[in-house]
Image: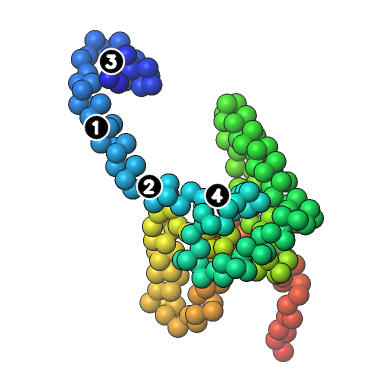
Amino acid sequence: MESGKLLHFKNLKQYCDETNATIATNYLRIALKNMKDGFADRFEQFKTSKRTLTFILNPLNTNTNEINNDPFGIDAGSLQMQLLDLKTKYLWSGKFTELKSKLEELEVQKCMHIAQHKWTALKEIPRVETLIFGAWNSLPECYSEVKKLAYGVLTVFGSAYSCEKAFSCMNIIKGKIRSQLTKKNLESCLKFRTTSYKPDLIKLSKGMQSQCSH
């Protein structure tokens, strides 16, 4: 933008070439710089918490002294011992080596589908969070503190969007007509509404006892 060549703004360059229009590149340059600075300030906390956030993908090469576990109520001593034990047990540590390979393969598939404009196929590939949660869910409870930290990091919102979405769904579900909905049923309805989980309704219905009217 500063050079005026518009190398990364193809549509704007095409418009200028077709109409011989003069673009105030200095104004756009300042606007882009302000936007960049704004994003840098907003996400500064993620930079300082990088070690903690990357723990979910690479726990085996994590230095626990660089992790901020205070917000999650983690016992630091138990975390260190469990993490050391995890690194020595190939059966469990191998889960994360396998996870890394799967995520790399997933990114390759995404790039291929995007390059070929196969948007339907893109929606059908496994979700990243599904693979990550699958790896952590497979660990036994003897690694409770390690799992607690992972789940704590995984549930941190990158923005208020997810929280606002949940509140909006809750207001729709529990309206004036359904004001007597119990807390338990409301929680179940919210899970269905805010996640991609699809229950096997046929299997569930077979396990229910039908009520025969006489």
Residue 123 placement: quadrant: top right
- Of helix, strand and loop, which one carries label 4? helix
| Residue 155 appears in the rendering | no
Of callouts 4 and 1, which one flags the residue occurring earlier in the amino acid sequence?
A: 1
Q: CA distance from mark 4 to mark 1?
A: 32 Å
Q: Secondary structure at mark 3?
A: loop
Q: Nearer the viewer, mark 2 or mark 1?
A: 2
x and y, in percent, of residue 26 in the image: 21, 23
Q: Which residue is mark 2?
A: 43
Task: Categorize mark 3 by other alpha carbons within 10 Å: few (<14), some (14-19), many (20+).
Answer: few
Horizontal side, residue 37 vs residue 124: left or right: left
Q: Quadrant of residue 15?
A: top left
Name the residue carrying label 4.
54
The mark found on residue 4 in the picture is: 3
For marks 1 and 3, the one nearer the N-term is: 3
Q: If you read the primary sequence from the N terminus, does the residue marked by circle 3 or circle 2 appear first?
A: 3
Residue at the disc numbered 1? 31
Q: Are marks 4 and 1 in contact (CB under 8 Å)?
A: no
The mark total stands at 4
